[in-house]
């Protein structure tokens, strides 16, 4: 599940927002990125709820980036866009979707947990300034 279109669209939107000092509406961003407006609007609202961007109301409203890119982790963007921690495997420890309910007793569970932890730490340490 690591990255879906929601994560991709969130990152692309943040790339556009970093280059403007004025709020941009969901429709304007959707047109610029050739993304469905209704889907993008939900992603932008989630980014705003997670304090990654700010939402301004009114005729000159829209979304604006208010944090420095070095202060926003890629993991926080993915979490906001997806609504959950990005899991490399469906049966990662915290996905609660082990097909046999055997987390902890599964032979490959230690590997999966270790691998997922490394991915989490990497994404937590990877800032938007590193990729944009």
Image (cartoon, rainbow, N blue to C red):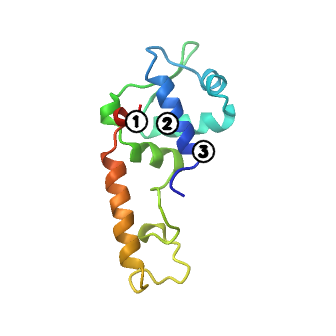
Q: Which residue is mark 3?
A: 5
- Residue 6: which numbered mark, if any? none
Mark 2 Cα shell of 10 Å, populated few (<14), some (14-19), many (≥20): some
Q: To which quarter of the image does residue 92 belong?
A: bottom left
- On the rendered image, what quadrant is the C terminus found in? top left
Residue drawn 47% across and 46% down?
78
Q: Which residue is mark 1?
A: 131
**Distance (Cα) linking label 1 and label 3:** 17 Å
Q: Which residue is mark 2?
A: 11
Mark 1 Cα shell of 10 Å, populated few (<14), some (14-19), many (≥20): few
The picture places residue 109, in percent across and down from the top left corner, at: 40, 78
Instruction: Determine contact: label 1, label 2, CB under 8 Å.
Output: yes
Please, what secondary structure does the residue beneath circle 2 have?
helix
Residue drawn 30% across and 35% down?
71
The picture places residue 97, in percent across and down from the top left corner, at: 53, 72
Residue drawn 35% across and 32% down?
129
The picture places residue 65, in percent across and down from the top left corner, at: 42, 25
């Amino acid at each position: 599940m690591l990255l879906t279109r929601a994560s991709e669209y969130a990152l692309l939107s943040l790339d556009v927002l970093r280059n403007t000092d004025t709020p941009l509406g969901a429709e304007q961003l959707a047109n610029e990125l050739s993304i469905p407006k209704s889907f993008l609007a939900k992603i932008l609202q989630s980014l705003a709820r997670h304090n990654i961007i700010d939402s301004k109301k009114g005729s000159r409203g829209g979304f604006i980036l208010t944090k420095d890119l070095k202060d926003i982790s890629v993991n926080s963007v993915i979490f906001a866009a997806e609504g959950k921690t990005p899991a490399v495997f469906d049966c990662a420890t915290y996905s609660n979707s082990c097909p046999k309910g055997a987390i902890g007793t599964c032979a490959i569970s230690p590997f999966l947990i270790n691998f997922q932890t490394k991915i989490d730490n990497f994404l937590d340490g990877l800032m938007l300034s590193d990729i944009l």
